Amino acid sequence: MISPAQTLTLLAAIIMVGAIASLVWVSLAWAARVTPRASLLMAGANLASAASLALHALRGKLPDLLTYRLSDLLAVLSFALLGTAAQAVYNRHPPWRATAITAAAAGALLTLLPYDGDLRWPARVVNASCALLTLAAGTAVWRQLRAIDVRRTPARLALPLLLIGALMAARGLETFVNPGRTPDMRLPTPFNLAFLWAALVLTLVQNSTLAFLVLMRLIQRIERLLERDALTDTLNRRAFDCALADAHAWLKRGRGYALVMIDMDRFKQLNDTLGHAAGDAALRQMVRELQPCLREVDRFGRLGGEEFCVLLPDTDIAGAALVAERMRALVEAAPLRWLEQDWPLSASFGITEAERGDADGGTVMARADAAMYRAKGQGRNVVQP
Ligand SMILES: Nc1nc2c(ncn2[C@@H]2O[C@H](COP(=O)(O)OP(=O)(O)OP(=O)(O)O)[C@@H](O)[C@H]2O)c(=O)[nH]1
């Protein structure tokens, strides 16, 4: 025998979890500044959900307009925010139009539908729209996570959202299975008890999952900061050396690679004439110009000063020559625009291919460096093997 106290206690527990979670998310957004947009959306979702359920629990004690219509509207809002928050963790500008249209349509229906007597239709609108919003967001997050990094952020982390969607769909279907019963979560029915337990567990799991994703995002950001050059956003020396060591390890398993050493020409003269800021702008411009020449697997690093190196996996000397020549032409074709003046830019390129006899990546890099110095000796702005 289920008592009304059981369903009410569960409702109170979900409300409390929602209220506490919204405070945690606000502090994550403001104090820790961790993915603030997603964190604030999560705070809003939890708050709206807690308010909706609190109003629902107070039916009969407050005006019906608040405990029925407003409660349902807040429920739709909370699910719309939840879906957008989940997508905002890995996408600063999550798609919101479809969510807004669904929520607005549900809101309009809930405003127009009569709330006297038969409450099954408002309940169907709430549950169907919430299920739709969560299932769509869950599918989008699943795709996002698969696209980002399968190993570190498994797509399975989107599962709680999909389960919440399924739970809401089940609640909508219940109004068809038990058409005689008024949809009220406080009633001590086996379905309500199961629904509230599932809702409590899923609220906890969903909040923890999203907190975990936010943490992963933070770790990835720190890792990126540690391996990037602050001025040009290419790999720094340490990260490039790691990439080179990895590539060299693959060489022993039959996967070759080539290096392109790049050194800007007469850079001191540019610095001395136009100033250090212009030199910095030239370095950034060159990196920007060269990016389109690179594939996803290529690694672009700044070794120091105006010297860069590109690691090209699965590439031989002929391939490296093609890439380097394309890069050389691009640098030459784009002078630095500084204070209404054009300053011609060029770079010298040394290329080499890793050979089985090379002891380590450093040996290959030394050969590319020597080739680059030969290019300087030949008058600069050339590619030398
Ligand atoms: N603006 C700027 N200049 C830098 C940076 N790092 C190193 N440099 C300058 O780059 C210049 C490199 O000069 P050099 O090694 O003589 O080379 P170069 O003038 O390009 O001569 P060649 O390579 O022979 O054509 C020095 O003046 C450094 O101070 C940087 O991050 N920003």
Image (spheres, helix red, strand yellow):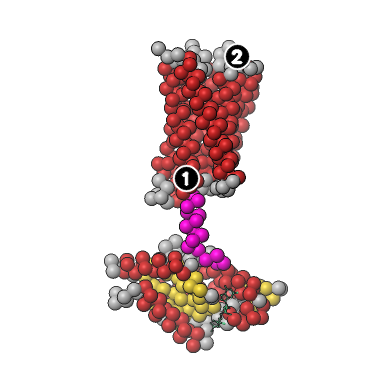
Which quadrant of the figure has residue 244? bottom left
Residue at image point 51% right, 78% down: 263
Q: CA distance from mark 2 to mark 1?
A: 40 Å
Type of residue at label 2? Answer: Gly
- Disc 1 residue crowd, few under 14, some 14–19, many 20+, Cα 10 Å: many
- Disc 2 residue crowd, few under 14, some 14–19, many 20+, Cα 10 Å: few
Check disc 1 and report its element: helix, strand or loop.
helix
Q: What's the magenta region?
A: 217-232
Residue 225 lies within the magenta run = yes
Residue at image point 36% right, 77% down: 363
Residue lying furthest right in this view? 340
Say which of 128 and 17 sits in front: 17
The answer to whether 383 appears left or right of 353 in the picture is right
Q: Is mark 2 within 8 Å of ligand 1?
A: no
x, y (%) of residue 228?
50, 63
* Residue 237 showing in the rendered view: yes
Q: Which mark is residue 291?
A: none
- The image quadrant where one finds the C terminus is bottom left
Look at mark 1 in the image and give the residue it sits on.
213
Type of residue at label 1? Answer: Leu
x, y (%) of residue 24?
55, 39
Q: Which mark is residue 60?
A: 2
